[in-house]
Amino acid sequence: MTEHFDILEILLVEDSPADAELTLRALRKANIGNHILWLQDGQEAVDFLFQEGQYAHAHTHRPRLVLLDMKLPKLSGIDVLRRIKNDPERRSIPVVMLTSSNEERDIVEAYQLGVNSYLVKPVEFQTLGEQVGRAGLYWLLANRTPH
């Protein structure tokens, strides 16, 4: 059976259901909650983006934005970022690291690998919502990327 992912605005890669729900709610509140795919581990994200594994025969569409947690099961967010930015066909996809890590070494490594933005998740839902909403609006509406 072949699956179709015809329209995909945002690929959210987040292992915490609570954080994913907060992020999805914030995006909906900013009126950019349509066409989002939520995946819960790094390997599944790579499989989706590169049409490997369970997505080998799926017709996946390139997301306009990847919101990527750093600490993920199976394959870390850093490893997912490395795969995206080392691939000539995918490196122009904007990747926003949305993580709880405020460690300087994590920030430096993410930028060295080509992350487009690094956002530390705030503790309060309202602040998270505002931050995610602004990021989504910027990357989907204001920013221009090659098609």
Image: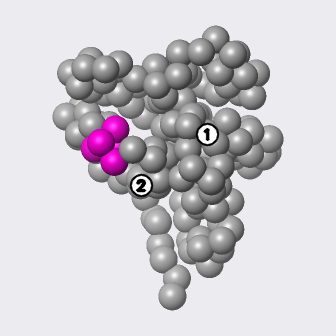
| Spot occupied by residue 60 in the image (x, y as percentages of width and height) | 55, 65
Residue 5, placed above or below residue 18: below
Q: CA distance from mark 1 to mark 2?
A: 16 Å
Q: Residues within 10 Å of mark 2 (few under 14, many from 20)?
A: some
- For discs 1 and 2, the disc positioned in front in the rendered view: 1
Residue 111 seen by the camera: no
Residue 41 seen by the camera: yes
- Residue at 54% from the left image edge and 29% from the top image edge: 97
Badge 2 marks a residue whose secondary structure is: strand
Residue type pointed to by label 2: Leu
Residue 20 belongs to the span the image colors magenta = yes
Number of labels in the image equals 2
Side of 78 relative to 137 (left or right) = right
Q: Which residue is mark 2?
A: 37
Q: Is the magenta region chiefly helix, strand or loop? A: helix
Q: Nearer the viewer, residue 39 or 33?
A: 39
Mark nearer the N terminus (1 vs 2): 2
Residue 129 belongs to the span the image colors magenta = no
Residue 131, placed above or below residue 74: above
Side of 109 relative to 16 (left or right) = right
| Spot occupied by residue 105 in the image (x, y as percentages of width and height) | 69, 16
Side of 83 relative to 32 (left or right) = right
